[in-house]
Image (tube, helix red, strand yellow):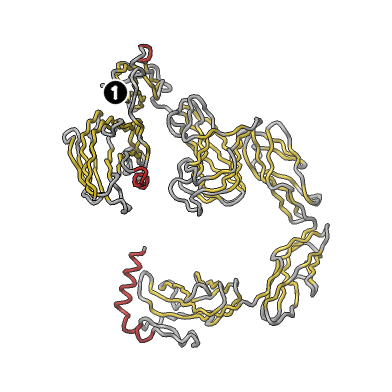
């Protein structure tokens, strides 16, 4: 958009510089008609409803502009000083005391050339009349009067009060409003030049629920409490009668959910509402904290995550009681409230222990104020305060994966969250008895195991087995045997279905001195305390299962477990030297897998290097010039092919 504006400006400048140079100074004391600027001399019949407006701070005025053929021309509005008056589609809003000029320009549709303009002079004063209230309710069954007061910021303090419907509500010259019969009236106070008004609603009886939100437990009835007494015609109702029934103010819960209860009286002209939350019976317990869910051991357990504990603050550990989760988020984002990086709060859930089931989820939540949420990986949505209901379909994931049901909170506030799941059935696909297994070369009883495969609705499916790293583990008819330390992925294929099991082979008699790599983006790697260390990073759609480096920092074991093939689906190895200057990275790749492995190597102040097949070009050197003061990527290997990598690296650098 910025580039387009620049082109438009340049075109206008080139076309109109001579004319504008002699006419850009405008006497603001002239009328709009005499001070208009014609860029070009085409008269399109542009007229405005007013040439001059006087407003008080906070007031609005709508100006109508027309042409001789509104279908042919586009109008644009600008203000000479937005601190005094701003304008949008002809609606002028007074911001601060002073004078401003509103300009409306007519262009032919899709053209950048201004054909005709008009100006409206705006005078904004700080003189005003303000009422103590802008809306009031008067009940005839209670005190049928209400006192209003006016604050006058003007030389003329003498005011007059009047009502537009005195038969409904009248007003004295001291501002005392008296209700007479059910209806609405507008009370106005004026000193002749300034005015303010208040909307009055007169009711026979006024009533409301004492609580705007009530919580009921299945098996226990709940009696609602009212403030005020409704007329005899008042009737209770509930929007969703499958959740609860209501009679004479007594709620009988049926199933978990949220809905709105109404008490409506036509005689009183009142529709009183409150939100009903129905939960299961159960004792409160704290949620577990964690990024993923160990659903094999803890199915149907919610976890919470403050993704950056420095910047995400909650009042206390969230609790769950009868399926109802309570959380109070005090802060997301940095200290200034900016939503940067991964500074969010999450709730996550895996509804079963094995994965592979389809569900309907109804997610109810009550928010005390407007909220921005992303549900089940969807886009960010702004939800209103109060009751919200979101209906979703999803499949449960493998137990080792992040929970499929998730709520990302990009806002602060108090929330009552009530997810309700309905199991539809098992998804027809290939399932293995294990998704992840550790074998031990030092223990004969743990050197092998047998995987079993099943497809719902099929007996004894024919399965083809393979290992992506037969140096580490082999497989035959589902029987997996450990051969050497490392990680292998065992894949099972049956028809169009496929799935895998990750096998980690250790030797408990031999100490593994390798160090786990830490995940880090480019900014993390550039930090002083992290320079001279290797980091890994999984892009969207790529997952690694092993990332270790030898104690001497010269051998990296790296396993890419899966990749969805997306444009961002890469895994990275990153490094920033300790010292600025010329840096040389000597590398040698060893790859075990079934794909064609490629790598893109990049470094500061150097051309990138693409290697299309590491099995043919496995070793080499890469030179770059590191500058720690530059906010740029230091050095990285960018990998995509699924499989096991052993990378020998040697970094040498000459300081500046």
Which residue is identified by label 1? 467
Q: Sort mark 1 into few (<14), some (14-19) or many (20+) by Cα contacts within 10 Å.
A: many
For residue 564, side relative to residue 195 (left or right)? left
Quadrant position of the N terminus in the picture: bottom left
Nearer to me, 171 or 57: 57
* Residue at point 79%, 64% (across, down): 146
For residue 264, side relative to residue 512 (left or right)? right
Nearer to me, 534 or 141: 534
Kindly tell me whether residue 269 is visible in this rendering: yes
Query: Residue 576 occupies which quadrant of the picture?
Result: top left
Does residue 314 sit above or below 647 in this rendering?
A: below
Determine the secondary structure under disc 1: strand
Query: Residue 285 occupies which quadrant of the picture?
Result: top right
Q: Position of residue 27 (x, y in %)?
A: 46, 87
Kindly tell me whether residue 493 is visible in this rendering: no
Q: Position of residue 72 (x, y in %)?
A: 40, 73
For residue 134, side relative to residue 121 (left or right)? right
Nearer to me, 244 or 293: 293
Q: Position of residue 459 (x, y in %)?
A: 40, 17
Query: Residue 511 occupies which quadrant of the picture?
Result: top left
Q: Which residue is outermost to the top?
A: 444
Does residue 426 sit above or below 98 in this rendering?
A: above
Does residue 482 sit above or below 183 in this rendering?
A: above
Q: Which residue is outermost to the front?
A: 655
Q: Which residue is outermost to the left?
A: 616
Does residue 458 sit above or below 244 in this rendering?
A: above
For residue 167, side relative to residue 405 (left or right)? right
Q: Position of residue 609 (x, y in %)?
A: 20, 44
Nearer to me, 619 or 183: 619
């Amino acid at each position: 958009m910025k580039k387009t504006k620049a082109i438009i400006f340049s075109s206008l400048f080139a076309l109109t510089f001579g004319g504008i140079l002699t006419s850009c100074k405008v006497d603001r004391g002239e009328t709009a008609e005499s001070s208009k600027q014609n860029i070009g001399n085409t008269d399109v019949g542009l007229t405005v409803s007013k040439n001059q407006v006087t407003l008080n701070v906070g007031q609005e005025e709508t100006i109508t502009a027309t042409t001789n053929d509104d279908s042919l021309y586009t109008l644009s509005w600008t203000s000479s000083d937005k601190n005094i008056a701003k304008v949008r589609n002809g609606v002028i809003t007074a911001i601060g005391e002073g004078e401003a000029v509103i300009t409306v320009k007519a262009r032919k549709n899709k053209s950048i050339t201004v054909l005709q303009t008009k100006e409206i002079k705006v005078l904004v004063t700080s003189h005003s009349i303000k009422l103590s209230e802008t809306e009031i309710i008067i009940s005839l069954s209670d005190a049928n009067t209400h006192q209003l007061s006016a604050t006058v910021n003007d030389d003329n303090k003498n005011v007059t009060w009047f009502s537009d419907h005195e038969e409904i509500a009248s007003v004295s010259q001291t501002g005392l409003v008296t209700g007479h019969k059910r209806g609405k009236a507008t009370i106005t106070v004026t000193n002749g030049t300034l005015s303010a008004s208040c909307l009055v609603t007169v009711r026979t009886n006024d009533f409301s629920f004492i609580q705007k939100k009530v919580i009921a437990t299945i098996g226990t009835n709940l009696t609602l409490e009212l403030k005020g007494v409704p007329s005899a015609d008042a009737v209770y109702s509930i929007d969703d009668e499958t959740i609860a029934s209501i009679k004479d103010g007594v709620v009988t819960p049926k199933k978990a959910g949220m809905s709105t209860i109404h008490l409506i009286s036509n005689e009183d002209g009142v529709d009183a509402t409150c939100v009903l939350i129905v939960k299961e019976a159960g004792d409160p317990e704290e949620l577990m904290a964690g990024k993923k869910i160990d659903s094999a051991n803890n199915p149907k357990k919610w976890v919470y995550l403050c993704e950056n504990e420095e910047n995400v603050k909650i009042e206390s550990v969230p609790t769950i009681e009868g399926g109802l989760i309570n959380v109070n988020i005090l802060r997301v984002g940095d200290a200034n409230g900016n939503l940067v990086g991964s500074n969010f709060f999450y709730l996550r859930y895996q509804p079963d222990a094995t994965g592979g089931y389809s569900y309907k989820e109804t997610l109810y939540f009550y928010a005390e104020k407007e909220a921005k949420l992303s549900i089940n990986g969807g886009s960010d949505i702004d939800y209103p305060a109060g009751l919200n209901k979101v209906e979703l379909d999803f499949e449960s994931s493998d137990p080792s994966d992040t929970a499929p049901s998730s709520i990302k909170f990009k806002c602060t506030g108090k929330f009552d969250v009530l997810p309700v799941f309905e199991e539809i059935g098992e998804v027809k696909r290939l399932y293995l008895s294990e998704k992840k297994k550790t074998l031990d070369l030092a223990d004969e009883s743990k050197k092998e195991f047998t995987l079993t495969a099943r497809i719902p609705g099929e007996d004894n499916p024919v399965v083809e087995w393979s290992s992506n790293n037969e140096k580490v583990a082999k497989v035959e008819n589902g029987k997996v045997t450990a051969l050497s330390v490392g990680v292998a992925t065992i894949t099972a294929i049956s028809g169009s279905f496929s799935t895998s099991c990750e096998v980690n082979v250790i030797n408990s008699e031999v100490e593994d001195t390798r160090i786990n790599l830490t995940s880090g983006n480019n900014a993390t790697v550039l930090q002083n305390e992290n320079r001279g260390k290797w980091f890994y990073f999984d892009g969207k759609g790529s997952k690694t299962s092993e990332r270790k480096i030898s104690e001497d920092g010269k051998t990296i074991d790296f396993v890419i477990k899966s990749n969805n093939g997306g444009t961002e689906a890469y895994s990275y190895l990153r490094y920033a030297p300790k010292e600025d200057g010329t840096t040389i990275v000597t590398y040698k790749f060893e790859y075990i897998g079934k794909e064609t492995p490629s790598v893109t190597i990049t470094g500061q102040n150097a051309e990138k290097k693409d290697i299309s097949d590491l099995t043919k070009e496995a070793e080499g050197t890469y030179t770059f010039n590191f500058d720690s003061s530059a906010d740029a990527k230091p050095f990285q290997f960018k990998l995509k092919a699924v499989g096991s990598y052993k990378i020998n690296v040697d970094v040498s650098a000459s300081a500046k």
